[in-house]
Image (cartoon, grey):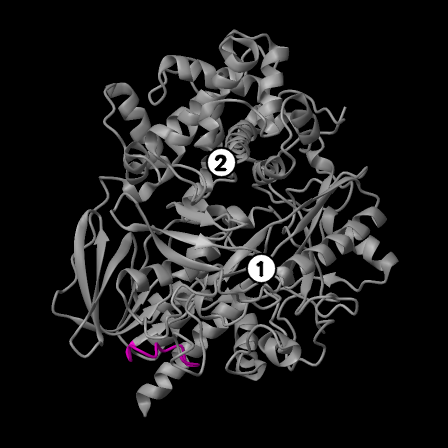
């Protein structure tokens, strides 16, 4: 599995290989303040979302994990949509409330504890049930479990891979495009493209 | 039935609740300004139009349907005004090479996707802004084939277009030369064309080379694709020199160099040079009529104000969802009962694989290589056909659609994504038959403006399912031959087509072969909603061809 050197994207951002508009977008994420007060979710639900996100994107190697729950909270607060919603799903705010509640119901049903109190292995077993659309809980009668999992997974994934450090992790340097790309064929790299270790 | 709270949530969606913390309020305001500069309160409000003026032609929408006819009508000396719901951007300074930052290019008002194969909107196929969806189209520009327009004659299924390919060919030719399309000459699947492409094809990226190699082994003909991005600098009337494509691979999130022939760097500046007026941030809510049923003007919201513009003729070019939505909201052109009906979406299955080679999927136009050998496959058990394209992909788009399909999470998800630089894809673009179960309607749920959200029903029928199976088999074989591992398929449907079909009878179609509404003599519709059938190619070039043709038919009829 490919690994790329650390620091490549941060270094590129400081060069004129990146346009000001691109730099502004990426630096905003890179320099987002660590402290985030949830404005849409209440504190308990927000901690639950953080715990779920930490199992979907475990980041044990990072001292400061890329924050995912804050992006969801901020979006739901603004009420932004992405152009569509499954007709079988309630509006996004309601879907998250019901879905996160359902995750806790599943944790209670299986382990008689809240999701945030479970160890990682047990948390994973609840996520696995959800991914298989087999999690217990009364909320799932109002919310299609497979669609909720898909939507939440897609949103967390979008937030994660939009982050410069996650892009660095997968060796993406498409943001450094000011000179364009001349070497675009198979196995052709330009000097600013990181090589795998 | 949803309970009361749910309904209230639904109506609430895009409204911002009061934020108490002044610092946070300031930060959020700044962020939203960066995301959408058109909301800057310091920006001067647009001047109010003369309430008594009656313009010759009013055009709603500035995408592939509206922009070409806007230019044509302006060049004919008519007083024309276009209303565009989104903002005008300066791609060179505003467009970031960042997928998330470019979300302002997409029509993000929520649509409800129903049926067995709910269609994704937003970045998948719907745009907003000066240039409409062409701001984020991939700029694939294959011509439709003769047989695409005569599906019923050939297969006894689907419908025929009211005219043949001869009607479109002169426009294809004109467009290819006006836009500066890069492509192979002669075109392998249509070698008898009178004129070749004005520019040589764009270079092949990793995915294209892999597909080329495997297809050669399998006896499938391939060619560098026709694409509306410039392989050399090109002079554009009304714009000046447009520079060649720099292979930045970001076509689907906005071209910042002007190499891609989106409407904002081609037809719209041309239209303005000839006196067309384009009003941005203008969201149409009402179409007004007199007692005889003629359109007299429209009402739109702009910068918090309600504005009326009177017109002699209206051209509705808002795309295959917003066009029928406006017709349904205004109960306009409803005589045939066809408004919103026969929604179609192309069979767009993708197959992805992991290769030992370095592919770096962010470089080069996404769809470098094409094959149309599958236009009428010998072993087909379906009507119509499809084309094959190689695909590169931006990382966030790839990751999100991958998890929707594969449902990977945890360490497995992060591990898989580490292969991003070794990923390559192929997709198909296949015909879709019109079906009565697939349609657009108004839902009970309202958006922030109080307008009902559209609900779009789509279920892939037997013919589409058979095509999916054939296409998946073909693509898996190509990728296995190319040496891919961990191959997976993503069933998807792309482009929004139908919903205000063109035909020869007022009982069966919304518009006549000239694009004029049967019920409303001064209403023209021109976008993908008038397509009677979906075609086996990407629709943008044909929408533009219809747009020029609609303008020419209008001008000719006006002279009579």
Classify the position of the C terminus of chain B by image quarter: bottom left
Left or right of residue B554, residue A57 in this image: right
Magenta stretch, overall SS: loop
Left or right of residue B71, residue B201 in this image: right
The residue stretch that appears in magenta:
B512-522
Element type where label 1 sits in the image: strand
Instruction: Residue at 73%, 52% (x, y): give it.
Output: B472
Residue density around tag 1, few if under 14, some if 14–19, many if 20 or more, within 10 Å: many
The answer to whether the residues at label 2 and label 1 have Cβ atoms under 8 Å apart is no
Query: Is residue B388 a member of the stretch shown in magenta?
Result: no
Q: Looking at the image, which is closer to me, B516 or B434?
A: B434
Left or right of residue B100, residue A79 in this image: left
Badge 1 is on which residue? B346
Give the answer, above or below, for where A17 lies relative to B23: below
Give the answer, above or below, for where B526 lies relative to B461: below
Element type where label 2 sits in the image: helix
């Amino acid at each position: 599995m490919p690994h790329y050197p650390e620091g490549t994207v941060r270094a590129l951002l400081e060069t004129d290989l990146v346009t000001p508009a691109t730099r502004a977008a990426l630096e905003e994420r890179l320099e987002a303040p660590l402290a985030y007060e949830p404005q849409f979710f209440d504190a308990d639900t927000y901690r639950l979302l953080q715990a779920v996100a930490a199992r979907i994107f475990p980041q044990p190697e990072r001292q400061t994990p890329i924050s995912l729950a804050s992006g969801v909270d901020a979006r739901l607060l603004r009420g932004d949509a992405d152009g569509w919603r499954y007709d079988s799903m309630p509006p996004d705010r309601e879907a998250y409330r019901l879905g996160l509640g359902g995750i806790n119901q599943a944790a209670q049903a299986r382990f008689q504890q809240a999701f945030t109190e479970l160890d990682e292995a047990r948390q994973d077993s609840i996520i696995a049930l959800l991914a298989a659309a087999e999690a217990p809980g009364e909320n799932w009668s109002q919310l299609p479990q497979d669609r909720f999992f898909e939507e939440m997974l897609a949103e967390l994934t979008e937030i994660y891979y939009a982050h410069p450090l996650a892009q660095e992790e997968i060796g993406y340097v498409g943001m450094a495009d000011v000179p364009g790309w001349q070497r675009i064929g198979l196995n052709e790299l330009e000097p600013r493209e990181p090589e795998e270790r | 039935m949803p309970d009361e709270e749910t309904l209230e949530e639904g109506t609430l969606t895009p409204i911002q609740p009061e934020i108490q913390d002044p610092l946070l309020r300031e930060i959020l305001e700044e962020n939203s300004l960066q995301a959408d500069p058109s909301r800057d309160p310091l920006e001067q409000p647009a001047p109010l139009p003369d309430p008594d003026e009656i313009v010759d032609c009013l055009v709603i929408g500035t995408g592939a349907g509206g922009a070409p006819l806007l230019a044509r009508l302006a060049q004919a000396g008519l007083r024309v005004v276009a209303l565009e719901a989104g903002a005008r951007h300066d791609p060179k300074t505003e467009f970031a090479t960042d997928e998330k930052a470019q979300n302002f290019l997409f029509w993000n008002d929520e649509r409800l996707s129903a049926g067995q194969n709910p269609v994704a909107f937003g970045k998948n196929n719907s745009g907003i802004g000066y240039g409409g969806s062409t701001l984020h189209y991939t700029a694939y520009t294959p011509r439709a084939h003769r047989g695409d327009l005569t599906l019923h004659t050939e297969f006894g299924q689907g419908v025929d277009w009211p005219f043949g390919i001869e009607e479109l060919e002169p426009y294809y030719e004109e467009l290819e030369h006006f836009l500066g399309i890069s492509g192979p000459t002669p075109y392998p699947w249509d070698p008898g064309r009178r004129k070749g492409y004005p520019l040589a094809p764009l270079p092949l990226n990793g995915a294209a080379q892999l597909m080329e190699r495997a297809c050669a082994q399998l006896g499938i003909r391939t060619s560098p694709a026709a694409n509306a991005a410039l392989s050399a600098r090109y002079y554009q009337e009304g714009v000046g020199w447009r520079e060649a494509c720099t292979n930045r691979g970001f076509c689907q999130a906005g071209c910042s160099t002007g190499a891609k022939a989106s409407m904002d760097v081609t037809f719209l500046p041309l239209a303005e040079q000839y006196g067309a007026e384009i009003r941005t941030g203008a969201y149409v809510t009402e179409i007004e009529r007199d007692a005889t049923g003629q359109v007299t003007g429209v009402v739109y919201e702009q910068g918090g104000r309600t504005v009326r513009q009177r017109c002699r003729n209206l051209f509705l070019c808002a795309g295959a969802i917003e066009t029928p939505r406006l017709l349904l909201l205004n109960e306009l052109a409803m005589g045939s009962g066809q408004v919103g009906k026969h929604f179609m979406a192309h069979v767009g299955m993708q197959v992805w694989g992991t290769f030992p080679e370095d592919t770096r999927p962010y470089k080069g136009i996404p769809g470098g290589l094409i094959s149309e050998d599958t236009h009428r496959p010998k072993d087909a058990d379906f009507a119509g056909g499809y084309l094959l394209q190689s695909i590169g992909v931006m990382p966030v788009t790839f990751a999100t659609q991958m998890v929707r399909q594969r449902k990977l999470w945890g360490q497995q998800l992060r591990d898989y994504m580490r292969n991003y630089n070794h990923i390559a894809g192929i997709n198909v673009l296949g015909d879709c038959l019109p079906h009565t179960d697939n349609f657009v309607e108004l839902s009970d749920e309202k958006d922030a403006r109080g307008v009902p959200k559209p609900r779009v029903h789509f279920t892939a029928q037997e013919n589409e399912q058979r095509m999916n199976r054939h296409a998946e088999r073909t693509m898996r074989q190509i990728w296995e031959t190319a040496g891919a591992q961990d191959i997976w398929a993503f069933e998807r449907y792309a482009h929004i087509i139908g919903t205000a079909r063109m035909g020869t009878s007022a009982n069966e179609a919304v518009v006549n072969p000239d694009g004029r509404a049967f019920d409303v003599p001064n209403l023209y519709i021109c976008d993908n909603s008038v397509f009677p059938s979906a075609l086996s190619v990407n629709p943008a070039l044909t929408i533009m061809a219809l747009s020029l043709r609609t303008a020419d038919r209008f001008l000719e009829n006006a002279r009579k």
